[in-house]
């Protein structure tokens, strides 16, 4: 065989690791997107007659001024990490789990039931039982779209969106029925809620060890979220299931011809995603409130889609993306206290940021595709390279 | 092979001259001081192995890549071509392998798209213009037909008409026959002759040497980014061209090893379902059975059925008398069938995964490569990959790069390495050399013959008669989902052709 000019037997060369360059490109793209969106945000701030630097530094200061502030940021980030991981796990297998929101709500219901009915479990085992039930609830609700997809081909986006509505009603029903408070001593319960959980069911607050005040709500859940991220990383880098899931996600035909059962992989992945989604509500249930309340914080499952995207479905990226997101979210309070800019500015900024990242990543991806294509020497053979589609696409657009 | 124009009207001044064109990519010189000229009224074939630089050169001409050196002279004037738009303005059009047509639009709507000439589209006028244009070059096409109803050959005609509608007189065709049936290829050639008569200059990129010899007026051979020779069909032949391309003599007929044909390994009885309508055959140990047929007669369904990728309505599949019906693909693979799929991207490789991840696909749950707990043994998998990549001479930067970065030939070698490593009882090879250049074809063929030499059974499904003849011990023809005849390997092609078109089933004498 004649060698093409630049290529040599694969085994002969060890070079810098293949993950390094994509990572650098990604970080650079993210920073660029941040600069662009901050600049657009600055225009809006100026229109409000404020100084952008003051506003941005107020947001930053609020997040980083002391241990308690940062602890609060991490507490807000905790559910977002679980949520984004749940989205990312499915995404890697080519599935769009829009039902993370519903799975999270069902997880709160089953966890509440466990916290109120598993009191016979000794000590901290109760808390463990509650977490297990949260995951089981999420898994059970994720199993529905998974089985529908595998058995009938119903698209998971449609079924999960519909199931989200059912989950909202299910939670409302549970709060009105089986989980409705029974204790009336003390005061009137103006809002509908469950009974308070026993302290054994709650997540221990560990903020004190890091010099945070209890108000930071910094609990064992944050390290648990980091563990979950590490497990997801391990799943996709080192485990058979993760390997099969990635193969199914990026080339179902080749995966199937390689003997992988697509349906079995999809169901397993959906269940893992559901288990992670079930943990989203634990911060508010077991740390912030100590009960299931009517005005619970919703939408966390949807925010996870954005955070997963920012983290590019990479567990490590997701942790940082979630923290970044919660710095902005916490900034809402800073704006209210320190500036004339309405708090909704933060939501606008988050939206601008996501859109900028979409655009910048896309541009960076094409740029990287060109570079890789050129470097790998698959030049004359572009019909065989997936990267060429990008190039040809570009060329067509030019034409 | 008598069909050549006026040798490119050698008296006329060239339409395009590319002089000393150099194109570098980081670490690669794709075109090294390449000079070439295109004359009016010629079909100029550009041939070379994958990676030789032929597409790159034409992409430079079409404005998709800036050249690092050299100049382009069009009709006597030096021009800078910075984009495909510039190229079209200079009368240069290119038809890529992958068509970009809007399926629900009509032929005319696709052709005028982007060149409507104003906010209002006079479709009936445009349709008339398209009709005149098509007729003048002998293109059989209905301007009002919807693209999604067209055959691949017709879609290609639309792409060519799109370029002609914009007034180009230099037409670059990148591997135009790769997607065509033999009959469609002949029709394309008839169209190209019309264009040549009209003084157009056509660049024909290909590595199908028979076709090049048939249609080209001049042939330029590239190897490793440089021009290694220029010739005409009268001065050369297939073997000489192949040697120029590869740099060494290429065997078009490999020595078939003599092996005793043993007991039946695979037996198919009355397979039904989808396009399969009662297909039966058997393959014996040490035998290569060639299944010849025009594509679309059940080849894909046959391969999928054997691999358990498609449910059947009836019939039995047995391997060494073991019934494979209803088994999972995984179990069928474990029973001893190795599979080279007809579409290596869709069924062979996961392009977004690394070489080492691809080498273990299908074996990743062997005890050697993952534990009971489901953890992959990365070190062992990478050792396997390193060994296979060396053994099969897969050329890549490292085993950590994605399979998408390999050339087609190297992708196919990777699949061969993976599949043959398992010591199969039967090799199922579907269109194993599709889209490969001569050097890679020779490699794949020799690997298939090695399987025979090792006493394994091989079921070869191919639409290329060359391939069927080069490898098979026995040939069967497939037509509309069933076997229409069995032939010795020295049967003349026209007799095989009758079988491929139905044979006695169609009521003709067998």
Image: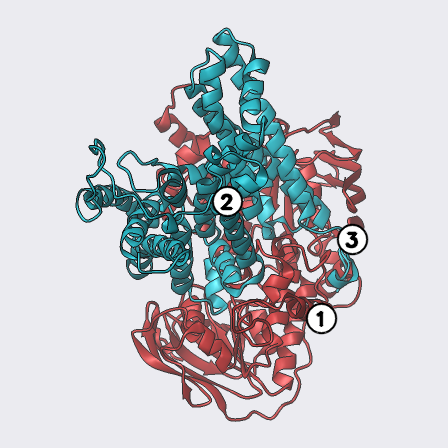
Q: What is the crowding at mark 1: few (fewer than 14 residues within 10 Å), some, or many (at least 20)?
A: some
Residue situated in front as seen by the camera: B164 or B27: B27
The residue at which mark 2 appears reads as: A222
The residue at which mark 3 appears reads as: A5
Q: Nearer the viewer, mark 2 or mark 3?
A: 2
**Mark sitting on residue B376:** none
**Residue A315 appears left or right of A99:** right
Cα–Cα gap, marks 2 and 3: 52 Å
Q: Quadrant of residue A161?
A: top left
Are discs 1 and 3 located on one and the same chain? no
Residue that extends furthest to the front in the rendered view of this protein: A186
Cα–Cα gap, marks 1 and 3: 23 Å
Residue A56 percent across, percent down from the top left: 56, 19
SS at circle 3: loop
Residue situated in front as seen by the camera: B485 or A9: A9
Q: Are marks 1 and 3 in contact (CB under 8 Å)?
A: no
- Chain A's colour is cyan
Residue situated in front as seen by the camera: B476 or B507: B476
Chain in red in the render? B
The colour scheme used to paint the residues is by chain
Q: What is the crowding at mark 2: few (fewer than 14 residues within 10 Å), some, or many (at least 20)?
A: many
The residue at which mark 1 appears reads as: B387
**B292 w.r.t. A170: above or below:** below
Q: Are marks 2 and 1 in contact (CB under 8 Å)?
A: no
């Amino acid at each position: 065989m004649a060698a093409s000019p630049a290529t040599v037997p694969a085994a002969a060369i060890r070079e810098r690791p293949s993950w390094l360059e994509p990572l650098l490109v990604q970080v650079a793209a993210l920073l660029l997107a941040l600069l662009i969106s901050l600049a657009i945000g600055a225009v809006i701030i100026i229109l409000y007659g404020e100084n952008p630097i003051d506003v941005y530094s107020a947001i930053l200061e609020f997040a980083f001024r002391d241990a308690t502030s940062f602890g609060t940021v991490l507490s807000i980030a905790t559910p977002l990490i679980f949520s984004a991981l749940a989205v990312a796990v499915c995404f890697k297998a080519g599935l769009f789990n829009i039902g993370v929101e519903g799975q999270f709500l069902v997880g709160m219901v089953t966890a509440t039931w466990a916290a109120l009915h598993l009191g016979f479990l000794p000590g901290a085992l109760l808390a463990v039982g509650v977490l297990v039930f949260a995951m089981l609830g999420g898994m059970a609700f994720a199993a529905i779209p998974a089985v529908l997809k595998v058995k009938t081909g119903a698209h998971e986006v449609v079924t999960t969106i519909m199931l989200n509505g059912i989950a909202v009603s299910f939670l409302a029903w549970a709060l009105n029925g089986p989980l409705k408070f029974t204790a009336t001593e003390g005061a009137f319960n103006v809002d509908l809620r469950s009974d308070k959980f026993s302290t054994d069911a709650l997540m221990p607050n560990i903020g004190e060890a890091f010099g945070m005040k209890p108000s930071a709500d910094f609990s064992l859940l944050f390290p648990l979220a980091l563990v979950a991220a590490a497990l997801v990383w391990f799943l996709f880098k080192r485990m058979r299931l993760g390997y099969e899931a990635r193969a199914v996600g990026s080339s179902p035909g080749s995966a199937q011809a390689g003997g992988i059962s697509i349906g079995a992989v999809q169901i397993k992945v959906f269940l893992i995603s559901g288990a992670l989604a079930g943990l989203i509500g634990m911060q508010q249930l077991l740390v912030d409130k100590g009960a299931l309340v009517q005005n619970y914080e919703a939408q966390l499952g949807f925010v996870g889609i954005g955070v997963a995207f920012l983290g590019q479905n990479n567990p490590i990226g997701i942790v940082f993306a979630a923290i970044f997101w919660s710095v902005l979210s916490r900034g809402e309070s800073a704006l209210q206290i320190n500036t004339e800019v309405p708090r909704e500015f933060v939501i606008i900024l988050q939206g601008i940021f996501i859109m900028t990242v979409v655009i910048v990543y896309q541009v960076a991806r094409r740029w990287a595709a060109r570079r890789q294509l050129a470097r790998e020497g698959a030049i004359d053979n572009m019909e065989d390279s997936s990267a060429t589609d990008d190039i040809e696409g570009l060329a067509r657009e030019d034409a | 092979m008598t069909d050549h124009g006026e040798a490119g009207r050698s008296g006329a001044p060239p339409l395009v001259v590319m002089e000393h064109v150099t194109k570098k990519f980081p670490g690669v010189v794709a075109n090294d001081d390449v000079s070439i000229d295109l004359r009016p009224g010629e079909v100029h074939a550009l041939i070379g192995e994958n990676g030789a630089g032929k597409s790159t050169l034409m992409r430079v001409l079409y404005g998709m890549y800036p050249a690092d050196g050299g100049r382009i002279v069009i009709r006597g004037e030096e021009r800078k071509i910075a984009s495909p738009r510039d190229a079209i303005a200079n009368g240069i059009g290119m038809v890529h392998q992958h068509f970009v047509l809007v399926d629900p639009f009509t032929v005319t709507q696709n052709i005028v798209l982007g060149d409507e000439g104003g906010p209002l589209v006079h479709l009936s006028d445009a349709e008339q213009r398209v009709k005149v244009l098509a007729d003048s070059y002998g293109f059989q096409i209905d301007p009002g037909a919807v693209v999604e109803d067209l055959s691949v050959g017709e879609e290609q005609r639309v792409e060519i008409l799109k370029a002609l509608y914009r007034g180009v007189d230099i037409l670059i065709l990148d591997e135009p026959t790769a997607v065509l049936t033999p009959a469609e290829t002949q029709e394309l050639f008839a169209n190209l002759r019309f264009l040549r008569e009209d003084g157009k200059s056509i660049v024909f990129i290909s590595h199908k040497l028979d076709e090049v010899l048939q249609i080209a007026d001049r042939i330029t051979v590239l190897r490793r980014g440089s021009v290694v020779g220029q010739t005409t069909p009268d001065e050369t032949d297939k073997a000489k061209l192949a040697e120029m391309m590869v740099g060494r003599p290429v065997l078009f007929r490999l020595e078939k090893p003599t092996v005793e044909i043993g007991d039946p390994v695979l037996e198919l009885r009355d397979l039904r379902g989808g396009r399969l309508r009662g297909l039966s055959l058997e393959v014996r140990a040490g035998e290569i059975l060639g299944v010849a047929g025009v594509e679309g007669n059940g080849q894909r369904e046959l391969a999928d059925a054997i691999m358990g990728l498609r449910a059947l309505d009836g019939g039995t599949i047995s391997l060494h008398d073991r019934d494979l019906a209803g088994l999972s693909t995984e179990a069928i693979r474990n029973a001893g069938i190795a599979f080279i799929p007809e579409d290596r991207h869709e069924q062979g490789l996961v392009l977004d995964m690394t070489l080492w991840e691809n080498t273990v696909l299908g074996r990743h749950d062997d005890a050697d490569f993952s534990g009971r707990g489901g953890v992959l043994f990365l070190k062992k998998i990478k050792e396997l990959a390193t060994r296979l990549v060396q053994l099969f001479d897969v050329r890549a930067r490292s085993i950590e790069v994605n399979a998408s970065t390999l050339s087609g030939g190297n992708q196919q070698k990777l699949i061969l390495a993976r599949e043959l490593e398992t010591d199969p009882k039967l090799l199922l090879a579907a269109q194993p050399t599709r889209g490969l250049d001569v050097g890679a074809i020779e490699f794949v063929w020799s690997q298939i013959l090695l399987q025979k030499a090792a006493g394994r059974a091989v079921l070869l499904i191919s639409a290329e008669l060359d391939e069927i003849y080069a490898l098979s011990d026995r040939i069967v023809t497939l037509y509309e989902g069933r076997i229409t005849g069995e032939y010795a390997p020295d049967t003349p092609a026209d007799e095989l052709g009758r079988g491929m078109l139905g044979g006695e089933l169609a009521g003709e004498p067998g």
